[in-house]
C-alpha cells in the first residue's frame, strides 16, 4: 500500500499544478479577449460619438435656419405699405425756363 500511496501522492503533486496552470491559461486568454473587445468597443463608441456630434451640429444649424428665420421674418420685418407712390423723374436740358416761361425746379435726391 505504500506504493499506492506514493503513486497517489505523486499524481496529486503533478495534477494540482497542471490544473492550476490550465485554468490560469484559460483565464488569461479570456482576459485578453475581453481587453481586445473593450478596445474595439471604445473605438466604435468614439466614432459614434463623433458622428452624433456632427449630426447635432447639423440639426442645430437647420433649427436656426428654419425656425429662427421664420420667427425673424414674421415678427421683426416691418409690414410693407400697399399704397406706395411712384416718383417719376425726367432729365431736362440746362435751360432755366421751359416753353411757358416758368422756371424749372431742380430736385435733389
Image (cartoon, rainbow, N blue to C red):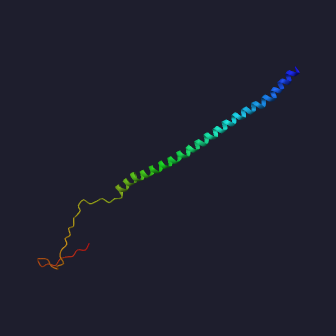
Residue 8 sits in quarter: top right
Residue 12 appears left or right of 95: right
Residue 75 appears left or right of 85: right
Residue 36 is situated, as x and y percent measured from the top left of the image, at: 62, 40
* Vertical comparison of 30 with 91: above or below: above
Residue 97 sits in quarter: bottom left
Residue 105 sits in quarter: bottom left
Name the outermost residue toward the right.
Answer: 2
Name the outermost residue toward the left.
Answer: 100
Residue 71 is situated, as x and y percent measured from the top left of the image, at: 37, 54
Residue 30 appears left or right of 99: right
Residue at 75%, 30% in the rendered image: 19
As rendered, which of 73 and 46 lies closer to the eye?
Answer: 46
As rendered, which of 100 and 17 lies closer to the eye?
Answer: 17
As rendered, which of 42 and 32 lies closer to the eye?
Answer: 32
* Vertical comparison of 76 with 100: above or below: above
Residue 11 is situated, as x and y percent measured from the top left of the image, at: 81, 26
Q: In which quarter of the image is the N terminus?
A: top right
* Vertical comparison of 104 with 69: above or below: below
Residue at 42%, 51% in the rendered image: 62
Residue 86 appears left or right of 45: left
Q: In which quarter of the image is the C terminus?
A: bottom left
| Number of numbered discs visible in the structure rendering | 0
* Vertical comparison of 21 with 101: above or below: above
Residue at 71%, 35% in the rendered image: 25
As rendered, which of 37 and 90 lies closer to the eye?
Answer: 37
Amino acid at each position: 500500500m505504500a506504493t499506492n500511496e506514493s503513486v497517489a501522492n505523486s499524481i496529486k503533486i503533478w495534477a494540482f499544478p497542471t490544473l492550476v496552470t490550465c485554468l490560469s491559461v484559460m483565464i488569461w486568454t479570456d482576459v485578453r479577449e475581453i481587453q481586445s473587445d473593450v478596445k474595439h468597443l471604445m473605438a466604435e463608441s468614439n466614432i459614434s460619438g463623433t458622428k452624433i456630434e456632427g449630426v447635432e451640429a447639423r440639426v442645430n444649424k437647420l433649427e436656426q435656419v428654419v425656425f429662427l428665420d421664420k420667427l425673424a421674418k414674421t415678427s421683426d420685418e416691418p409690414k410693407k405699405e400697399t399704397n406706395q407712390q411712384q416718383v417719376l423723374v425726367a432729365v431736362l436740358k440746362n435751360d432755366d425756363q421751359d416753353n411757358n416761361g416758368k422756371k424749372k425746379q431742380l430736385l435733389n435726391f
